[in-house]
Amino acid sequence: MKRRPRLSVQTAAILGLGIVVLQLLSVLTIVQVVLLPVARRSAEDLSGLIIISVQTYRQLGPDARPAFVRHLQRDDGIEIGPPPRRVPGFADVKGHLYRRLLEKALSRRLGRKVQVYSFARPSALWVSVPVAGHPVWVHFPRRRLASSLPMGVLLIIAISTVALLVLTTILVRRVLRPLGVLSEALRTSWKSPLPDLPPRGAQEFHELLSVFAHMRLRLQAMIDHQSLLLVGIAHDLRSPLARIQMALELLAGEIPHDLLEGMLQDTRRMSELLSQSLALGRGLIARENDLDLVELLEEAGTDFQRSGGSWNAVLPRRLPFRGDREALRRLFGNVMDNVQRHGGGKVEVRLRKEGRRKYLQFCDFGPGIPAGDLVKVFEPFFRCDDARGHGEGSGLGLAIARQIAEAQGIQLSLYNRPRGHGLCVELSWEN
């Protein structure tokens, strides 16, 4: 079965995606409404300053130019000097937005195309401004642009996005954590104690857990009453059935042979059905004790081999378990009886662990069960004769096995082995 994402993960993902999209829209709005207009205005101002500085530089005499250059560098961060040399380490940085804006502003003011060069090392912008047919190279460091672009706004948006995502995750986990507790309570056995909800959780979750606890008590009482009723009816019917069988044996000479055989066969089937009904009713009421599950399995394997079956088990030396010994013995007996009837009389038993959960598998070598009937076979009196090849039994074996397993806090499931090589009965539990 495909594992679905948790509600908390889905909710946090949806809220997180919404926050990210909203913040991206905010960034785009700020860029279009604030940053781009400010950058264009800054480029216009800088282009005007560059052109005026270059024109002034060309008009000054050679003696006054060094002082003007120092003054321009100190007050405005702009330097006038020789063109850059193409040496290793000077690489054009493409895609610089402000460079393109400055190119447009200079080109519009000078009436001709002007190219601005952006270098990574050292980090600077260079531009050649033609004045009276002579180019003058101007450059300035990129850090001079920091005041032109309000990057603080973008930083605030980024920090607020991270903060909102963290707060959303905390809030979703706090609100939906009780649902996980309730889900865990629904998966546990009837007799397991209910988990505790967070003390500061919502009142509705505490009320829901209280209602569930009350419902569980009522269901358990109803199951106990039905089990006692089933056991009582089955027990009371055994005596009249025994007297009928005795009467049939005494009247053997007065009743036609075919009719007598049919009646005796019917009484035997009724007796078997009553025995299984008693087992079903008693299996719903678990009496817990500490026991060794491996010892019980070996006993079931010995009985299975005595009846002509082939038993191959890989088990640990000991496997502690708390449950009803007789009910578990009946559970293993029903599984082995199913193998004997329909699984080719040969079974492989394996135990594996995944974390705290243990899986006990009984795999036979029969024809298996159609995928559509893997759930139906647990219904009382359902017999999948076409797939398993026999019409024997009353159809209660697996139903009783599941009832006993659930009463012991064990999950029982079926699956077919690959390529139709048999059926596997899997018992899983945590302890």
Image (spheres, helix red, strand yellow):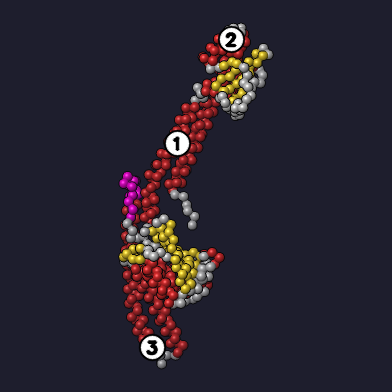
Categorize mark 1 by other alpha carbons within 10 Å: few (<14), some (14-19), many (20+): some
Q: Which residue is mark 1?
A: 162
- Say which of marks 1 and 3 sits in front: 1
Quarter of the image with the C terminus is: bottom left
Q: Nearer the viewer, residue 41 or 326?
A: 326
Q: Nearer the viewer, residue 172 or 266?
A: 172
Q: At label 2, which amino acid type do we have?
A: Arg
Residue 299 screen position, x and y as percent: 39, 72
Q: Nearer the viewer, residue 249 or 359?
A: 359
Categorize mark 3 by other alpha carbons within 10 Å: few (<14), some (14-19), many (20+): few
| Marks 1/2: CA–CA distance | 52 Å
Q: Which residue is mark 3?
A: 249
| Up-down relation of residue 302 to residue 60 (above or below) | below
Residue at x-position 34% and y-position 81%: 240
| Up-down relation of residue 52 to residue 168 (above or below) | above
- Say which of marks 2 and 3 sits in front: 2
Evaluate if marks 1 and 2 touch, with contact meaning CB atoms under 8 Å apart: no
Q: Total marks drawn?
A: 3
Q: Which residue is mark 2?
A: 65
Q: Give the extent of the magenta segment.
A: 194-207
Q: Is 64 a magenta residue?
A: no
Residue at x-position 38% and y-position 76%: 274
Residue 41 screen position, x and y as percent: 55, 20
Q: Is 203 a magenta residue?
A: yes
Q: Is residue 152 left or right of residue 209?
A: right
